[in-house]
Image (tube, rainbow, N blue to C red):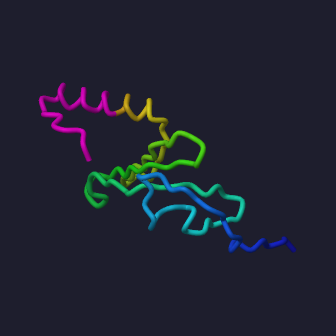
Amino acid sequence: MATVTPTNKPAGIVNHPSWCAPDRCGHLVPPLMTEMTRYHRGATRRIGDARAGGMVVAYIIGVDARTPLIALHATCRAGIGWAELPLTQATQLIERLSGLVVEAGGDTGSHSG
């Protein structure tokens, strides 16, 4: 029989980054398994409609001593995929998507959330 470790250990003092959402933070919401890293998570940004052609969900995820990543989840009728991008790759993705919008004759508008 496997040994079960309780997850209600005191976590100590945690400094949350300004982008961390308390209702999604891995330091406040217990992980599924005790060995999982407790990540800070930011608010969810959704684009698209899951019932129509698909949806992209993006949020910030990070560990205390490291630079945060941008997490992307894409869903469509064929399945789900995800990526965790460093800030430099997230910037490249924004630039390339903006380039595609311009190439298609659209207006990129503002990048602010």
Horizontal placement of 67 versus 43: left or right? right
Horizontal placement of 35 versus 24: left or right? right
Q: Magenta segment: does it hold 63?
A: no
The quadrant in which residue 1 appears is bottom right
Question: Which residue sits at x=50%, y=61%?
Answer: 25
Name the residue at the right extreme. Answer: 1
Q: Is residue 81 above or below residue 3?
A: above
Which range of residues does the magenta coloring cover?
A: 94-113
- The residue closer to the viewer here, 56 or 43, is 43
Horizontal placement of 82 versus 50: left or right? right
Horizontal placement of 102 versus 13: left or right? left
**How many marks are shown on the rendered structure?**
0
- The residue closer to the viewer here, 80 or 33, is 33
Q: Is residue 68 above or below residue 75?
A: above
Q: Position of residue 72 (x, y in %)?
A: 42, 46
Q: Position of residue 96 (x, y in %)?
A: 31, 28
Q: Magenta segment: does it hold 110?
A: yes
Q: Is residue 97 above or below residue 38?
A: above
- The residue closer to the viewer here, 72 or 14, is 14
The quadrant in which residue 29 appears is bottom right
Q: Position of residue 67 (x, y in %)?
A: 53, 39
Question: Which residue sits at x=52%, y=55%?
Answer: 40
Question: Which residue sits at x=64%, y=55%?
Answer: 37
